[in-house]
Image (cartoon, helix red, strand yellow):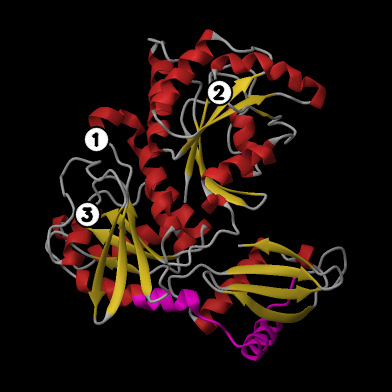
Amino acid sequence: MKIFALVGKPNVGKSTLFNRFAGKRLAIVHEMPGVTRDRNTAIINYKGFSFILIDTGGFEPDTREIIPQKMKEQSQLAIEEADGIIFLLDKYSGWTPQDQSIYNLLRKSEKPIYFTVNKIDNPKHEQAIAEFYESGCSEIFAISAEHGIGVYDLLESMQHDFPEISDDFSDGDEDDDITSVAIVGRPNAGKSSLVNQFLGKAKQIVHDEPGTTRDPVDNFCKHYGKTFRLIDTAGIRKKSRVSFLIDKYSMVAALKSIERSDVVLLMIDATDGVVDQDAKIAGYILDRGKGIILIVNKWDLVEKDGKTMDQMKLDIRDKLRFLDFAPIIFVSAKTGQRVDKIFSLVNEVNSECKKRIQTSDLNQIMETVTARHTPPVKLGKKTKIFYSTQVSTRPPTFMISTNNPKAINSSYHNYIIKQFRYFFGFKGSPIRVLWRDKTKKTGQEES
């Protein structure tokens, strides 16, 4: 999945455009310059286009103040990681020396730059962009991030350079017989060491300092005749360069690896337990509908008694409740302890993600589970379930036809998913359920 960085001086509307693409308010928007300090990252699915977008803080090239300097550092990291750059400018401020300085830095990256002037709320205002051609750029996109005007033209230009950002793009070279396995986790969780164990030789660079792996590396190996593509997480810089930004930077790398995978191995450092960063990465895995296995690494370094493993399992289940379906395995990538069991789990989870349930079996089970726990009533209207069918796999997705989809609350929705797991399994795989209004023939997704 391609990555684009959203760059510009403070208060040009970067967060507004970020929220426009994301379809929801993920970034704080305020008239005061410099509100966005940390980078904000999201997988964008907007009007048939799909990509990763990084929102950066206001870029001030010559600043020496501590906070703006950190914001500049974030922006530079985003530019390094990105495949393309959306350079956002403000119609009202015009072309400024500060913009020129930023543009000079961006051109050094030798990456596609989409020169975009924001706050063009009326076609009559497009003449205001003329002064921006002083920059020497060949094409300018006039947009209104707030109202969505001109945004599609920008996306089409991005697609011209990167055809794969369109949902209609498909790579015909992908081999269905190969299972892609992403190994993701926090810095220094042992991802490369695990890859080395899989390969049986030291092919990846392994180092105790977080951030040794910079770029995604695909390795192929066979296990009992089955071919696996191992995707090691990329994008981690050395701590001396990234300082406190290392967690944000690693998230971008994890997103890229997750997107390309069939099954994701989320590595948890047994010496630290589950931390916030693990939960964030786990959330991205769930959002993308990928199979997931929780790998508790460095188990050889943990002092144990007869209850240690059970206690850690309980702690993981408590902190990652939304992944109660994911299997947990305790390993040591350094010594190889239990590593050989991971491939069997990958095969099992991958099969569960592809599983299809016969419509007749599904409807029979639905009769049982709805009789045991009837759907909720709303405004005195009884909710009836008419028909259920599986509409897709990866992840398994079900459409349930009812006369009253708005009555289905999260509690009942989760009850249905738990019943599907009880009767059909789906170990390690997310499940999605769509509630369809039989009378309007429209669906509403709750997952």
Res 290 visible: yes
Q: Which residue is mark 1?
A: 238
State the image coordinates of residue 76 (x, y, percent, origin top left). Answer: 39, 27
Residue visible at 44% across and 75% down?
427
Residue receiving disc 2: 137
**Residue placed under numbered mark 3 in the picture:** 192
With 350 as the anchor, is 218 left or right in this view?
left
On the rendered structure, is 45 left or right of 309? right
Residue placed most toward the observer, 390 or 322: 390
Query: What amino acid type is highlighted by mark number 2?
Result: Cys
When asked about the image quadrant of residue 93, the answer is top right
Return the disc, 1 or 3, that comes first in the chain's sequence.
3
Residue 153, labelled with which disc?
Answer: none
**Is 65 placed above or below 281 here?**
above
Label 2 secondary element:
loop
Crowd band around label 1 with a 10 angstrom C-alpha radius: few (<14), some (14–19), many (20+):
some
Q: Earlier in the sequence, mark 1 or mark 2?
A: 2
